[in-house]
Amino acid sequence: MRTDHTLLESLCEITLEAAALALKRQGSSLPELKEDNSTVTEVDREVESLLRDQLAVLLPEAAFIGEESATDPGTLRQARSTEWVWVVDPIDGTALFSAGLDAFCVCVGLLRHGRPWSGVVALPALDQVYRGQDGLGAWCNETPIRVLEHSPPPDRAFLCLSRNSHQYLDVSDAFRVLSFGSTACNFVQVARGTVVGAVGRSHAWDHAAPAAIIHAAGGVLRHQNGREVDWLAALDGALFEPPLVAASPALWEQVAGGITCRR
């Protein structure tokens, strides 16, 4: 088992291969509506299959949880009882992907002892790849990145929210609100230091990879009420409640205090 920078390099190569497949196949299949009213395409399934096969070679002892895989009780029991768990979203932002828009991501996170430890988020249409690992740091392409440590001027106090956040959040006027349309794209902006924070309540596979990158970039990610995230419990695909808030330690209270959850 390789736990140094070579694992992150290999993970990045695998994720980029999957991202290249997604970009090549964009526009080749129509979206379908799943039971939870989210969308899926045949490309999602192809990308997840590629990742499952490649990651099994990279780390054979790890369990695998993917958005498009059947999460049966046996798989969950294995994932919750083993040291290593891959948590994969083959295409985060499938609606964007299907519409020919650019901010979709391929996300691969690795939990170790139930916490985000390594992650890669690739945006192939934008030629960006974010990566980070515990103890190594974080990068956007080849540039090291770090969370924002000080409050910016009001005209640069950007807060990234999910596209449906207006349904469950009220936000302070102290922030300028942005949404890139995909959870992972929103959250890696925190690691990059381009936004004050990000808020979302999606699923474990949307958050695990960016969480590892945010931690490696010096940030924190918790529930809005301050509670730590139980990642193993979340592997069943439930929405995070209260929503998750990511920011630097210096700004986390400011961000969390600037939003109100209606339900």
Image: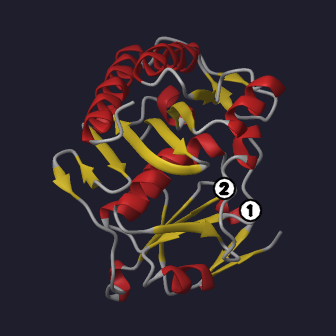
Residue drawn at (32%, 88%), measured in percent from left and top? Answer: 153
Residue projecting furthest to the front = 1
> Where is residue 2 shown, x and y percent of the image?
34, 33
**Residue 182 in view, yes or no:** no
Residue drawn at (50%, 20%), measured in percent from left and top? Answer: 60
> Where is residue 261 shown, x and y percent of the image?
75, 73
SS of the residue under disc 2 = loop
Question: Which labelled disc corresponds to residue 164?
Answer: 2
The kind of residue on which mark 2 rests is Asn
Q: Where 39 sits versus 226, above or below?
A: above
Colouring of the image: secondary structure
Q: Mark 1 — residue?
A: 167
SS of the residue under disc 1 = helix
> Where is residue 226 shown, x and y percent of the image?
66, 76
> Where is residue 232 shown, x and y percent of the image?
70, 46
**Residue 103 in view, yes or no:** yes
Question: Which labelled disc corresponds to residue 70?
Answer: none
Quarter location, residue 164: bottom right
Residue drawn at (57%, 44%), measured in percent from left and top? Answer: 206
- 207 or 56: nearer the viewer: 56
Residue drawn at (33%, 81%), measured in percent from left and top? Answer: 149
**What quarter of the picture does the C terminus occupy?**
bottom right
The kind of residue on which mark 1 rests is Gln
Q: Give the CA distance from mark 2 to mark 1.
A: 6 Å
- In the picture, measured across the screen, residue 152 lies left or right of residue 52, that is left
- 25 or 233: nearer the viewer: 233
**What quarter of the picture does the N terminus occupy?**
top left
